[in-house]
Image (cartoon, grey):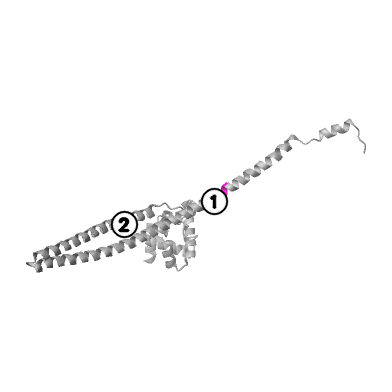
Amino acid sequence: MTSNGPCDITRVNETKIPPNATVVSALDPFAIAVDVFSVVIFIILAVLAGRAVHAFKQSKQALTESASLISVIVDALTSRIEQSESVVSQVQSELDGVKTRTGGVEWEQASLHSSHLQLLKSMQEILTNDKRLIGELEQAKTKFASLQQKRPVVEPAAKRPPLGGVVSEGDVLSSVTPTERETLEILSREGPKAAPELGRRLGKSREHTSRLMKKLYLEGYVDRETNRAPFRYRLSETARSALTPTNTEVTEKSSEKA
């Protein structure tokens, strides 16, 4: 096909690439860089969170081990004090006996009395130091115990529905399994219980009991006490009011028995 001169030039000018095409291609690398930066930030936050949880567990374990070590030291020092007191008592008894037996041997009595007094003084100083050390260790043990109790419990916020949305006075027992109902009745009669104790009462494994109590907690049947391990579960107020028979129900049941 032959060229028509100026007409072909006009067609070429009309088919030029729009200016926006260059902007879009330039923005693509920027968007990719933003995505990569976001992924890197997310990975860094995940690593920092994992390290924080690991550090918390190591700190708690260190506190427990320190408290145990202090208990061992206190027991050893207590035994040492008892032995020292026994030696002091024996020395004091011998000193009193020497005073009685020496009679007219003044020089020997004075020398022996002096040595015993020095020994007695040394033993009393040892006892005083040991008792002071025990007091300091007891204070440290109490401080460690208080730190363990006051350390905040890191627990993700549970997505629990409002208690009234799942548990109501009319249907609290209609949607639970026999095992769940038995669990709720135990908590209603005997008060808060830990999951291992409930598992033994129900004859269930640890894993089964853990899943059971988590389900009851998330559905609003029980509340969880997390200030110490293992967690203790107690009946929620809504479930308690539903499980407690009203005066009318008690009267009707009494009438039926009569």
Q: Secondary structure at mark 2?
A: helix
Residue 1: mark: none
- Residue stretch in magenta: 41-46
Quadrant the C terminus occupies: bottom left
In the rendered structure, the answer to whether residue 189 lies left or right of residue 168 reads: left
Provide residue 137's location: percent of width, then percent of height. 31, 57
Say which residue label 1 marks.
46
Say which residue label 2 marks.
137
Provide residue 173's location: percent of width, then percent of height. 47, 60
What amino acid type is highlighted by mark number 2?
A: Leu
Picture quadrant of residue 97? bottom left
Rendered residue at 27%/64% (across/down): 80
Does residue 245 show up?
no
Q: Secondary structure at mark 1?
A: helix
Query: Which residue sits furthest front?
Result: 107
Magenta segment: does it hold 220?
A: no
Front-lying residue, 39 or 66 = 66
In the rendered structure, the answer to whether residue 113 lies left or right of residue 6 reads: left
Query: Which residue sits furthest right?
Result: 2
Magenta segment: does it hold 42?
A: yes
Provide residue 5's location: percent of width, then percent of height. 90, 32
Provide residue 101's location: percent of width, then percent of height. 10, 69
Q: Main secondary structure of the magenta part?
A: helix
Label 2 crowd bin: few (<14), some (14–19), many (20+), radius 10 Å: some
Does residue 163 show up?
yes
In the rendered structure, the answer to whether residue 29 lies left or right of residue 180 reads: right
Measured in 3D between alpha carbons, the distance from the residue under mark 1 to the one under mark 2, in whole angstroms, is 39 Å
What amino acid type is highlighted by mark number 1?
A: Ala
Picture quadrant of residue 19? top right
Label 1 crowd bin: few (<14), some (14–19), many (20+), radius 10 Å: few
- Name the mark nearer the viewer: 1 or 2: 2
Check the image and report above or below for 209 versus 5.
below
